[in-house]
Image (cartoon, rainbow, N blue to C red):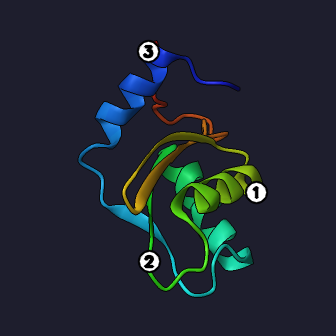
Amino acid sequence: MTLKGKQIRQLRSLAHHLDATVIIGKADVNDGTVEQASQALEAHELVKCSVLDSSSLGVREAAELLAERCGAEIVQVIGRRFTLYRETTREGVEKIQLV
């Protein structure tokens, strides 16, 4: 699913107040990081991630790698942080309604 401009703006505004849930450090994007991000995406649909200086990956590179492994879309990359979106598969929960 490719996000459209309006959808990206909507998700950016929703993500503005979020704190970083997933932190990528010296171990870079490993199986544990992918599992943590996947669980957070399943629970919240929109997750903000942070890349520490100790990581050997650049922020854009880490975002692309994590998004690919989680099946998510990159919403934005700013500074040392990035935001990912993936629609939840859970039934009976309120989902983010994209325009």
Q: Which residue is mark 1?
A: 69
Place residue 28 in its image quadrant: bottom right
Confirm whether residue 81 shows in the render.
yes
Tell whether 19 sits left or right of 46.
left
Q: Earlier in the sequence, mark 1 or mark 2?
A: 2
Q: Which residue is mark 3?
A: 6
* Amino acid on which disc 2 is placed: Leu
Give the SS element for disc 2.
Answer: loop
Q: Residues within 10 Å of mark 3 (few under 14, many from 20)?
A: few
Q: Which residue is mark 2?
A: 52
Q: Tell which of 86 and 57 is nearer to you.
A: 57
Q: Position of residue 17 (x, y in %)?
A: 23, 47
* Amino acid on which disc 3 is placed: Lys
Give the SS element for disc 3.
Answer: helix
- Do the residues under discs 3 and 1 have CB atoms within 8 angstroms? no
Label 2 and label 3: CA atoms lie apart by 30 Å
Q: Position of residue 38 (x, y in %)?
A: 64, 58
* Amino acid on which disc 1 is placed: Arg
What residue sits 74% from the left and 75% below the top?
Answer: 31
What residue sits 65% from the left and 44% below the top?
Answer: 72
Q: Position of residue 49 (x, y in %)?
A: 46, 61
Which labelled disc corresponds to residue 43?
A: none
Tell whether 17 sits left or right of 72.
left
